Amino acid sequence: MLETQKLNKSYGSNRALTDVDLKVSKGVIFGLLGPNGAGKSTLIRIINQIIDADSGQVLIDGKPLAPYHISQIGYLPEERGLYKKMKVWDQMIYFARLKGLSQHDAKTRIKNWLDKMEMSTWREKKIEDLSKGMAQKVQFISTIIHNPPLLILDEPFSGFDPVNAEIIKDQILELKKQGTTVILSTHRMESVELLCDQVAMINKSHKILDGTIRQVKNSFRPEVFHVTVENPVKEIPAEWTAKEDEGAYHFTLPLSGKRPNELLEELMNYGQISRFQEVIPSMEEIFIHQVKSTHDE
Ligand SMILES: Nc1ncnc2c1ncn2[C@@H]1O[C@H](COP(=O)(O)OP(=O)(O)OP(=O)(O)O)[C@@H](O)[C@H]1O
């Protein structure tokens, strides 16, 4: 659906993107990750044709990025931009018409979305009278009202309480079900784990890793297992520093070159094994590890 090839961008002597190659498959939720100042917004602005890259190119469905692609992209920027004096309904009609919808389609879709987002009673309120979360909902609906095949969401959950964040999350999953490709830029790693199929991480203008969540996690497996032995029949070695709890011994062991089954077989000599579970790092742990290790270079 979207590909970037050797994208470069500098602001004066400040490099924001260095040879960034990305491939976003159709219909996936793609997490664009990276610490503050990594270059994510710059990349998003290039895809949205707000700024130009210094070199490299962006392809959408195999075609070089062009002005006609703008109508195919729904973009929720990090800095929200609504007209404070306008009423919710008028604001939405304005955005929908701007995206090329007929008056009739705009009205039908906005009504549906306001119902879905539990905002129907707010349609005559001015934006300035809304809470931050409500205004965020208005902006979210305005972003997706024209059913764009590509959605770019920059921190879509910021400003939402957990209940409303859940509503937005469900809507993003629903859009994915309908075939929308979503690029999600967020610092909330738990949302990334829940929502994303693929991720790419940018740090100091370079892409430092990418792949499916499973591939990324597999490449950071520490090859360590959590083990529990119930009522051991043999003394648990002291160096395993096991914690005892009512006859159950819990400890963590590295594979140390063995295959998991070999380790398990060895452990079975100690008694009933009620837990043998590989330690899989969270995306949060991987993020922190990667950012710190490139920082130390
Ligand atoms: N308009 C600008 N002029 C000069 N430098 C800029 C400009 N916009 C961004 N930069 C610089 O480019 C680099 C990348 O910034 P960018 O905003 O793309 O990062 P980001 O990953 O989106 O960060 P954040 O998570 O904080 O939003 C940073 O060093 C930033 O200071």
Image: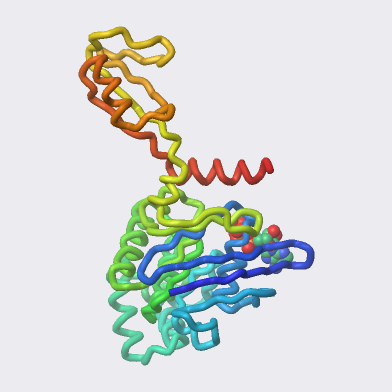
Residue 246 sits above or below residue 84 on the image: above
- Viewport quadrant of the N terminus: bottom left
Q: Residue at x 47, y 66 (%)?
A: 153
Q: Front-most of 86 and 118?
A: 118
What scheme was used to colour the molecule?
A: rainbow
Q: Front-most of 253 and 205?
A: 253
Q: Front-most of 237 and 114?
A: 237
Q: Which residue reaches farthest right? A: 13
Q: Residue at x 47, y 87 (%)?
A: 98
Residue 74 sits above or below residue 36 on the image: below
Q: Which residue reaches farthest left? A: 272
Q: Front-most of 111 and 147?
A: 147
* Residue 106 visible in the picture: yes
- The answer to which quarter of the image holds residue 170 is bottom left
Q: Is residue 34 left or right of residue 158?
A: right
Q: Residue at x 37, y 11 (%)?
A: 237
Please provide percent x and percent y for residue 233: 23, 9
Residue 173 sits above or below residue 224 on the image: below
Q: Residue at x 53, y 55 (%)?
A: 201
Q: Is residue 54 left or right of residue 250?
A: right
Whereabouts is ligand 1, in terms of quadrant? bottom right
Please provide percent x and percent y for residue 261: 29, 31
* Residue 129 visible in the picture: no
Please provide percent x and percent y for residue 94: 45, 84
In this figure, what is the number of numbered marks?
0
